[in-house]
Image (spheres, coloured by chain):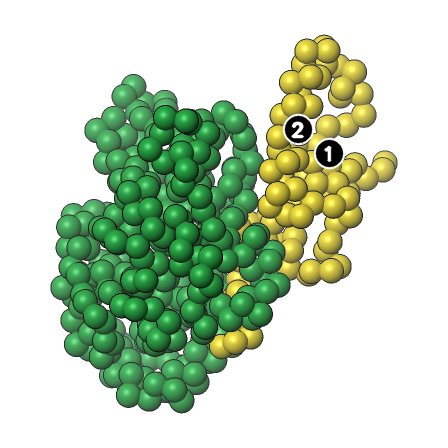
Chain colours: A yellow, B green
Amino acid sequence: MIALACWVCGYSNDPEVIRCRRCAWEIRGPGFLDSLTGLEQERYFKRRDLVRARWKELHQYDQTPRRESFPAEVAIIRSPTSACDLAIGGGLL
Amino acid sequence: MLAVWSHWSKPFALGGGGWPTPAHYLMSCVLSVETARSHFERTRLVTDSAGMKMLVDGVGLDFDDVRLDLSEIEECDPAWWVLGKIQAFRTQHEPFVHIDNDVYLWNGLPERLTSADVLAQNPEHFTDASDYYKLAELEQIRRYPYGWLPKEVEWCRSLHGAHQRSLNTGIYGGHRVDFIQYCAELAFEMLEHPGNREAVARIEDKPKFSGTLEMFLPAACLEYHTARPHSPFRTVEAATLFDSAEQAYRDGEAKSYTHMIGRSKSKPTNARKLETRVRLHYPRHYERCVEYSRIFGALPAALQ
């Protein structure tokens, strides 16, 4: 089984994951697009593009997971700042 | 610009806030007010009579004026602690910035924020799985025969589905107080609408819906109204201190901004730093925080 890249944020999810662990977009397996009619595909991509644009705007989207560059990021993205246990600018205290 | 803080006594008396002890909450109020004071023209506390007694008479904080507008929400369920903050937004009639009691503005705010229509900490992104919003659960209101949701919520939901945006309101305010009041009214209306009462009463763990009321509604209203040429709010623009949640964490120090957000305020290391800072820089207030907190029977660990 291979990891499935999220079509919104590019995060490589484990094969059994149903929703992207980073952005919560629903992960679809191979063959999904073939199961849709042309109109359904069009709708799907339109919606995906909207969500991707939102993601890009808010998270400076790139294709590579940035877990290494900013260790807390995954936690922040999956749960908003208010639910996080890191203080913003805590070093100033 | 007017700097505003708020304190609602009812939820505080029930042990809200997430601080290790009430004394830490009081110390955080001291640090928040005292660090910001010199950067703003005037300061205001919006509270109720018990809050005034505690923060002004008890702790000794000075404000240019104290308003008891939170007395008006005395009958509200304190589980909706966020209503205290929203009531403070609702009752401002001049440009202001509301500063959370756990936010410390070491160097004030840049001019692009103090001159903005609406200012906030940062845009935030959430999904149905986020436990500070619970938007999907709040939408159960729709299942009730006369349930009502604001058109702005319906519109954002239909457009963006599970991926929604909000504005973190660690700092929040601006010059378009008409827009800010409108958003605040919507929050109250959602909870008090006759068709929603049954659904709202059935909601468990109400604090987990706070983000929807205080942070999602302003963002939804912005998105909705700026897309409508005939809306009185079509020109409203928001400025945020940080461009994203990640940037807030990366650049908080660089922008001289501290927010003891969420669960971070319960961390012993942060609590110790807060105690030390207030004891060293505001010793008179520190003593009074400790003294006053004896009323609650809880002291900082170091003093027990």
Instruction: Give the structural element (helix, strand or loop) at label 2.
Output: helix
Report in which chain the residue with disc 2 lies.
A
In this view, which residue lies farthest toward the right?
A: A1
> Mark number for residue A48?
2
User: Residue B163: where, in percent of width, then height?
Assistant: 56, 36
Check the picture and name the quadrant holding the C terminus of chain B: bottom left
Residue type marked 2: Arg
Per the image, the residue denoted by label 1 is: A7
Whole-number angstrom distance, CA of label 1 to CA of label 2: 8 Å
Q: Position of residue B71 (x, y in %)?
A: 15, 55
**CB-based contact (under 8 Å), mark 1 and mark 2:** yes
Answer yes or no: is residue B155 visible.
yes
Residue at the image position 40 percent from the left and 34 percent from the top: B234
Q: Is residue B15 visible?
A: no
A16 with respect to B45 (left or right)? right
Q: Which residue lies at the image location 49% right of the left edge and 68% below the top edge?
A: B257
B8 w.r.t. B134: above or below: below
Q: Nearer the viewer, residue A22 or B152?
A: B152
Q: Is residue B293 left or right of residue B247?
A: left
